[in-house]
Amino acid sequence: MSVRVASASETVACERATMATGITSAELMSRAGTRAAGEILDRCSDRLRHGASIFVGSGNNGGDGWVIAEALCRSGIVTNVIEVASPRSPESTSARDAAISARATVAERAGEQLIVDALLGTGSSGVPHGEIADAIARIGERRKAGACVVAIDVPSGLDATTGAREGAVIADLTLTFGTVKRGQLISRGNCGELVALDIGLTEDNAMSSLPVLVDPNWVSQRIPPIPPDAHKGTRKRLSVVGGGPGMAGATILCGEGALRSGIGLLTIVAAETNAVAVHSAVPQALFQKWPSIPAELEKLAASADVIAIGPGLGNSPQTRDLVERILLSWSGPVVIDADGLNVFAGDLDSLAELLGERDAIITPHPAEMARLLGTSVDDVLNNRFELGSETANKLGCAVLLKGTPTVIFSPDGLRYVSASGTAALATGGSGDVLTGIASTLLAQMRDTGGTPAESAACAAFVHGRAAELCAFVRGTTLDDILAALPAAWNESPITPRAGVLAEVTLHS
């Protein structure tokens, strides 16, 4: 079952839908706390030898903490509960009574190496204050002294929807329930390792409309294998159009991303002055100058299964004309990035008309998306999980909105979220590599029924995974990421553990 990415209100809706089937709030609390305690016992056994301290608030998140306390006590773990606020609900009060009956101590001690944060849950918002803020500060001090911090559902103070994190807990492990929260993926540095636990939320229409979190198994189920009898034709042909004067590097990086992803034949179409640079950097590639006459456009169209347009192209009336002529003469699949999008800034209608009904992917970063839509970057970031849906529908193509996390939109309304990657990707040229990967998959996955949005989602995940396989952030270059792509492509699928929906290592 795919795990879904939800806002705070969407998570509450999923829980209410589950309770409408007859499951009580107390049962959900019991499931959440029991599952979390099991993970803590499995993952933190060395730390638990020194006991555990659990900080609880007054809401149901605090109730989860009391359930965890009872489970740890019954497993022989010395457990202290720091009751920052008394329970508000009957189910939380019952959980408190059960934990105390199991010999949980309501006191704050020193020396425990495992701290559980159960102060604030998914529904909280705003900057923590008063006794909650004081408790968060004490958790931070314990972490600085060497304790491991496990956050329950969300690190307290982290907005589950927006990722706002002023005054929030910094956790080493976050155990979240039923869904992965948007804010966890935006402010990944506060979450540490993120594990989504199955508490039996109902799979209804509301949940199925939420974005799918892309993971290794999802990708491995969709990437077609390269058969033993493959040749360069069956591995598909890509033409990369870009590389204005002095900007050969972008097309080179795009081409290398494609070659590292299994493309069969690569042609780089760039300004004529870039021929030597391309031949020197990518000897596997053919070179063609920008087409200026119909015969050259026909040659370009005849030599490709997919065309990528934009890396290093430049933004000018000349390049806008070039893009239009290519899209008018070529009706096949395209991936458009960078200046291939910038030349249509504020003119979505023209791009939609040129794309027609072909298979296509656009891969903007937030600034490019803002220019394309005539809005602000803040508007794009604040609405990153919704804004691309209308654009995908209007253009009739997949929209890969790069960022932390990356969100992919399909014209039919499906959404995918990729949380892989590290800050090593925050460098010029990273998007060009991604365009090469996405172009390769768009060409190859069509034969096995893959959609452009699925191709884009797989590309985003593998691109990020290659960065994760590099040992460092500082000092890692795109050469290192390109070199890591084969390992990223060939990782074995992960066998899901019972009760776990997803495990995500969030690299800050």
Image (cartoon, rainbow, N blue to C red):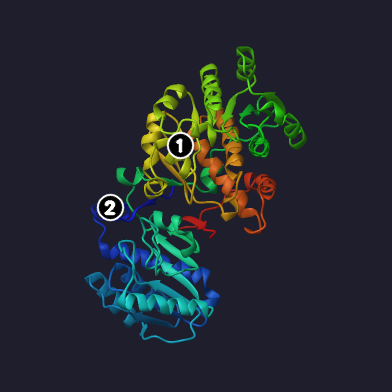
- Nearer to me, 107 or 288: 288
- Above or below, comparing residue 182 to residue 116 in the picture: above
For mark 1, give the secondary structure: strand
Q: Residues within 10 Å of mark 1 (few under 14, many from 20)?
A: many
In the rendered image, which quarter is residue 212 located in?
Answer: top left
Q: Position of residue 204 (x, y in %)?
A: 31, 45
Depth order, front residue of 285/379 = 379
Q: Secondary structure at mark 2?
A: helix
Q: Which residue is mark 1?
A: 399
Tell how many labels: 2
Q: Which residue is the site of mark 2? A: 13
Looking at the image, is mark 1 or mark 2 nearer the viewer? 1
Q: Residue drawn 31% across and 64% down? A: 124
Q: Would you say the residues marked 1 and 2 are in contact, meaning their CB atoms lie under 8 Å apart? A: no
Question: Which image quadrant for residue 162?
Answer: bottom left
Q: Position of residue 312 (x, y in %)?
A: 60, 35
Is residue 231 in view? Answer: no
Q: Callout 2, which amino acid?
A: Ala
- Quarter-of-image position of residue 287: top right
**Amino acid carrying mark 1 in the image:** Val
Residues at marks 1 and 2, CA–CA distance in whole angstroms: 27 Å
Q: Pick whichever of labels 1 and 2 is earlier in the sequence.
A: 2
Q: Pinpoint residue 392: horizontal percent, then vertical percent.
A: 41, 34
Locate residue 257 relative to residue 461 in the image: left or right.
Answer: right
Residue 130 placement (x, y as % from top left):
30, 77
Q: Which mark is residue 187?
A: none
Q: Is residue 287 left or right of residue 325?
A: right
For the residue pair 1 and 384, the one nearer the viewer reads as: 384
